[in-house]
Amino acid sequence: MFTVFGCRSTKRLSKDQSLVTKLTITGIGDEFSDQAEDFVALDIRPNSPFNLWIYNNFSKQGKLKLGEAPHLLDSSLVEISRNQIQKFLNIKGFLNAKVTDSISVKNKRASVFFNAVKGAEFKFRNLSFEVADSTVKSIYLANRKKFTHIDSGKRYDTDSIAYEREQIYLLMKRNGYFDFLRQYVRPTVDTNFNKGVADISLAILNPQNKNEHTKFIIGNTYLRIQPSSGIIEKGMTRDTAVIDSQYRFYDYSKFFKPKKIADYIYINKGDEYNIDNADLTTQRFFDLNAFRSVSVDFVKSKDSSSNELVGLVDIIPLKKKSNRLDGEYTFNSSITGLNLGLTYQNRNIFGGAEVFEVKLRGGLQFDKNVSGKLADRILSKDYQVGASLSYPRLITPFNIESFGKNGVPHTRIAVSYQNYQLTKSYQRKSLGFNITYDWVETKYKLHSFTPVNVQYSKALINDDLAALLVSQGNAFFLSTLRSQLLSSSYYTYTVNLPRLTSYNNFTFFSGTAELGGNSAALVSNLKKKTNADGQRLLVGVPYYQYVKLETDIRFYRSLGGERQFIARFNPGVGYSYGNIKSLPFDKRFFAGGSSGIRAWQARTLGPGNYNRSSLATDSARFNLRNLDQLGDIKFEGNLEYRFKLINNFIGSKLKGATFIDFGNVWQIRDNGLQGGQLKFNKLFDQTAIGMGFGLRFDVSFFVFRLDAGLKFKDPQFTGDDQYVVKYWFDRAGKRALKDSYAITNAPDKYSISQIQFGIGMPF
């Protein structure tokens, strides 16, 4: 049995109207309960409270399409729904099932009840096959065990018969039978109502007036590339070419080099027709991210005696060049920020669907606690420029077998420059270069390898800040902030990335291993230059040696419909050795943020029990903001329940989420941050816990996300004071906590809640 409740206002209903507030279906069983509700007419299911509230308050009596109109009792819909549930049970093998309905109305609130008596469960018994074409029969019998749901002893289910028919159709289409139709598959079922069994005879007919089905062979293939407008105007010229004596190109866009495009065609002359190869060709052209429309079709050869097919590929490319402007505004209780970016993209710079991209980005952060002119409140400036070139193939000094059947491989070469300035205390200029190879082992297994990743940074530190750090025993920050050379290689393996948008049960895994500095150490040994701290130099700056590992493991479980539960665990560790006893700044872990522990803003949690009041002065806290709350070890965990709220909310599907987040970052070595080191006997005391709720606005091509996180347990405090949950509903206590924190931790401010904005799902 299952019941759907809904308590709703009935003030606006007329005397003869009743609002459906309760729906109960009994006798179905857990296996079919979710499916059975789908056969109840939507207009007699209880409304979502929020949905109906939006309608009652903002739709102006239905003139605006906001929310959802009240679901009123309609006895004819009740009868239709009863009949549909009964038919559903018949389809699922309960041929004698009977469903009854009843209605109860009180105070204009209606309860609708359906009760099912399923009767005997029918099962498949005898199976027989009548296939006129012996070749077709042998193909079917050799492959049916791979897909069939029809076996003696299994529950009789007409959906299983329909599935068998579809699989036979696809099997024939994969084995050369271009002309094969679904109508050739004719199942006949004989049910015995007394014994609860079903005998099935499955026939595969021949085409009319033929003794067998015809297998077809691929001949030449013609490819037409239209202009990006999709319109071939009169008098328009085209580039033509013939590749491998089988592919005829007609390029009206004049953008592409046929020889490079031919690598992604899987329709080969002389092969048997296979629908999968046609679909694969379509998918790989889309994967190139250079085309907006791809159509693959076949026609029979004009020679009626031939069994040859002519391939027809029709393509419309995206615009070759594009510009995109984007921006974001971030804020919390004391810091606001503005970022703007401009991206230029050329999708086919060398005629082989290569993507050349240039990005310009600038950002400012403002401290709201500083008075004066706007320029005086600037906390940081960040300017970046980057260029990348992506090839849809693996470019290496040696030949590698193509991985194109499972996905388009890519080689990406990128350079970048960044100028970051923290008020008048610190400035860093960085130049970076990397080469990355991405390839697809299978549809669900992805690999990424970056053999070369180099970043050269030149830093300027204010003398007063440097002296302050040394006087406070925080010389560790100096080695983190000074000029440096970072060279590394890293590899990432990802499983089940394409499944993230589904509601299936699966496990997602992503793991990254990075090793840095060993090549630099070998080169530096030739000159053996050192600085005043005894660190060896390369190109005038010290270099890092380190190893870093990080994994992201998630368990996705469907709860029926668009309901889903996710458990995520995100551990990571980095260890520096050799030349500098600390990880590079960009390689250190942080906690908090819109995809982590959402009750904290990014880089404001940890490490461990660290509380910024241990920094001796307000100036130190100001100058080290976003620099001191980083770690060598990270562990974040998330538990999230997702569900649908409204199908149509101002043009988008509105979904909700509730979550619990936990974790922190820690230091391996004692770097002068009190409580920052990992202590296993204090692990729970050093763990932060937050919880909250969120809204996701799904507009099909992207998801806009809004999460509200509340601190439950804050490890920067001690004892029972860690459980800031006690202040959630204590306004006076909350105010006292904030006032005390403003004194001990100035200029930092404390907030129990945090609003997080994001594009896309958090994980």
Image: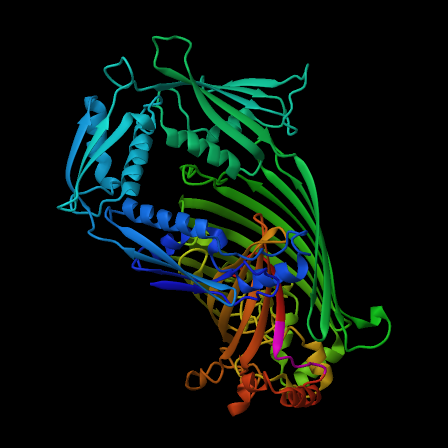
Spot occupied by residue 495 in the image (x, y as percentages of width and height): 41, 53
Q: Measured along the vertical axis of the image, is residue 288 above or below residue 370?
A: above
Residue at position x 62%, y 62% from top?
A: 12
Residue at position x 26%, y 40% from top?
A: 147
Residue at position x 50%, y 72% from top?
A: 661
Would residue 446 appear left or right of 537 to someone viewing this image? left
User: Would you identify the image quadrant in which residue 623 lies?
Assistant: bottom right
Spot occupied by residue 86 in the image (x, y as percentages of width and height): 32, 49
Viewer-closest of 452 and 660:
660
Residue at position x 44%, y 49% from top?
A: 76
Viewer-closest of 336 and 20:
20
Q: In this picture, which residue range is highlighted in magenta?
A: 747-754
User: Would you identify the image quadrant in which residue 249 lies?
Assistant: top right
Viewer-closest of 319 and 702:
702
Spot occupied by residue 173 in the image (x, y as percentages of width and height): 34, 28
Q: Measured along the vertical axis of the image, is residue 476 above or below residue 76?
A: below
User: Would you identify the image quadrant in which residue 494 lies?
Assistant: bottom left
**Colour treatment of the image:** rainbow
Viewer-closest of 466 and 80:
80
Q: Measured along the vertical axis of the image, is residue 488 above or below residue 9?
A: above
- Res. 490 in view: yes
Quadrant where the image shows the N terminus: bottom left
Q: Measured along the vertical axis of the image, is residue 565 above or below residue 711?
A: above
Spot occupied by residue 126 in the image (x, y as percentages of width and height): 13, 38
Would residue 594 appear left or right of 401 to someone viewing this image? right
